[in-house]
Image (cartoon, rainbow, N blue to C red):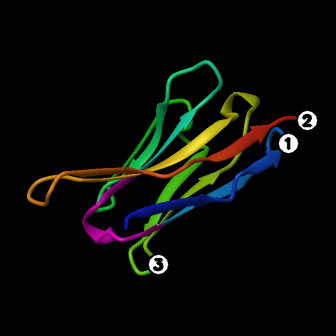
Amino acid sequence: QVQLVESGGGLVQPGGSLRLSCAASGIIFRIYDMGWYRQAPGKQRELVATITRSTTTNYADSVKGRFTISRDNVKNTVYLQMNGLKPEDTAVYYCNGRSDPPYRRNDYWGQGTQVTVSS
């Protein structure tokens, strides 16, 4: 059974920091491209950051320079370090894992963790 379990969300003041974690099980983690997405109330889900199996990273323009994605293939975990948080970062953050050829195509999502940035 595949599971992606996010943790680390919460309430933080503007300018503060949080680190999200996503622990994966039931997959061969090292072959998966991993990502973080977020969805604010009334908005569509959007990409925040991705990290490929070869550790190439990509970020949304809105978080560049503030957020850092990383992965630990021993712990089967992907992280999102969020610094300089702004109220507009408030959203539910979702972990995604995707595998592509030459491997079987799969696409998995976690249940999400709430991040609220407010004074």
Please tell me how crowded label 3 is: few (under 14), some (14-19), or many (20+) other residues with Cα within 10 Å.
few
Q: Residue at x 79, y 42 (%)?
A: 15
Query: Which type of secondary structure does the marked residue at label 1 adopt?
Result: loop
Q: Residue at x 69, y 27 (%)?
A: 88
- Whether the magenta-drawn stretch holds residue 36 is answered as no
The answer to which image quadrant residue 85 occupies is top right
Q: Is residue 17 left or right of residue 91?
A: right
Label 2 or label 3, whichever comes before in sequence order: 3
Amino acid type, label 3: Lys
Please tell me how crowded label 1 is: few (under 14), some (14-19), or many (20+) other residues with Cα within 10 Å.
some
Query: Which type of secondary structure does the marked residue at label 3 adopt?
Result: loop
Label 1 or label 3, whichever comes before in sequence order: 1
The quadrant of the rendering that contains the N terminus is bottom left
Q: Which residue is mark 2?
A: 119
Whole-percent x, y for residue 20 in the image = 62, 57
Whole-percent x, y for residue 52 in the image = 31, 55
Residue 18 to residue 26: above or below? above
Mark pair 2, 1: CA separation:
5 Å
Q: Nearer the viewer, mark 1 or mark 3?
A: 3
Label 2 or label 1, whichever comes before in sequence order: 1
What segment is highlighted magenta in the picture? 24-34
Whole-percent x, y for residue 70 in the image = 47, 61
Asked if the residue at tag 1 contacts the one at tag 2, i.e. Cβ–Cβ closer than 8 Å, the answer is yes
Seen from the viewer's position, the closer of residues 115 and 25 is 25
Q: Which residue is mark 1?
A: 13
- What is the count of numbered marks? 3
Q: Which residue is mark 3?
A: 75
Q: Nearer the viewer, mark 2 or mark 3?
A: 3
The answer to which image quadrant residue 25 occupies is bottom left
Mark pair 2, 3: CA separation:
34 Å
Mark pair 1, 3: CA separation:
30 Å
Amino acid type, label 2: Ser
